[in-house]
Image: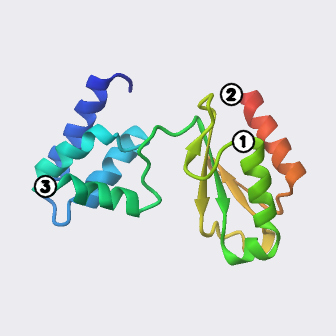
Amino acid sequence: MSGPGAIQSTVLDVIAALKDKPGALLPILHGIQDALGYIPPESVPEIAKALNLSRAEVHGVISFYHYFRETPPGNTTVHLCRAESCQAMGSLALEAHVKNKLGIDFHETTADGQFSLEPVYCLGNCACSPALQIGDEIYGRVTNASFDEIIATQEESA
């Protein structure tokens, strides 16, 4: 889906389908993000109007939940675990390496649009900490060197 008209149409369709549900704001935000990969800032006034909320209320919910994005994600999202088990096994050093290697921080996308970096607070792979997820694939016992290999493979397949 591309173009402002198609994006606006998708936003309006999601709002129309969900606005009458009790507590509709979160389902609408999830629906828009599921459809587009992010919640375009220009959709906030439409959401607010449909739910009789202020723009500030809608934006407050979007900014409160780390799951919601206001910019398009990269082609590939790297989810880096920040839970206690991974931290105990060196994920903070891995986090610094990943951020340096990609040249971005959490909730950002590389300039070429290839990678986005998102924190996650448990991948359920604690026995193989530190862990990360790319697409549906979970990687365990990730080192700086193995991360570099994983990313190189991702770049080649793009």
Question: Alpha-carbon distance for marks 2 and 1?
Answer: 15 Å
Residue 65: x and y in percent read 41, 62
Q: Which residue is mark 3?
A: 51
Residue that badge 2 annotates: 158
Q: Is residue 144 above or below residue 46?
A: below
- The residues tagged by marks 3 and 1 sit, at their Cα atoms, a distance apart of 39 Å
As helix, strand or loop, the secondary structure at mark 3 comes to helix
| Residue at the spot 73% in from the left edge and 36% down from the top edge | 154
Residue of label 1: 102
- Which element carries disc 1, helix, strand or loop? helix
Label 2, secondary structure: give it: loop
Residue 35, position as x, y percentages in the image:
37, 41
**Amino acid bearing label 2:** Ala
Above-or-below relation of 13 to 88? above
Which of the 4 quarters of the picture holds residue 152? top right
User: Is the residue under label 1 in contact with that under label 2 (CB below 8 Å)?
Assistant: no
Horizontal side of 24 relative to 131 (left or right) equals: left
The label nearer to you, 3 versus 1, is 1
Q: Earlier in the sequence, mark 2 or mark 1?
A: 1
Q: Earlier in the sequence, mark 3 or mark 2?
A: 3
Task: From the top left corner, tell me how far across and down residue 144 is, in percent.
Answer: 86, 53
- Please tell me which residue is depicted at 21% across the width and 52% down the height of the picture: 55
Quarter holding residue 76: top right
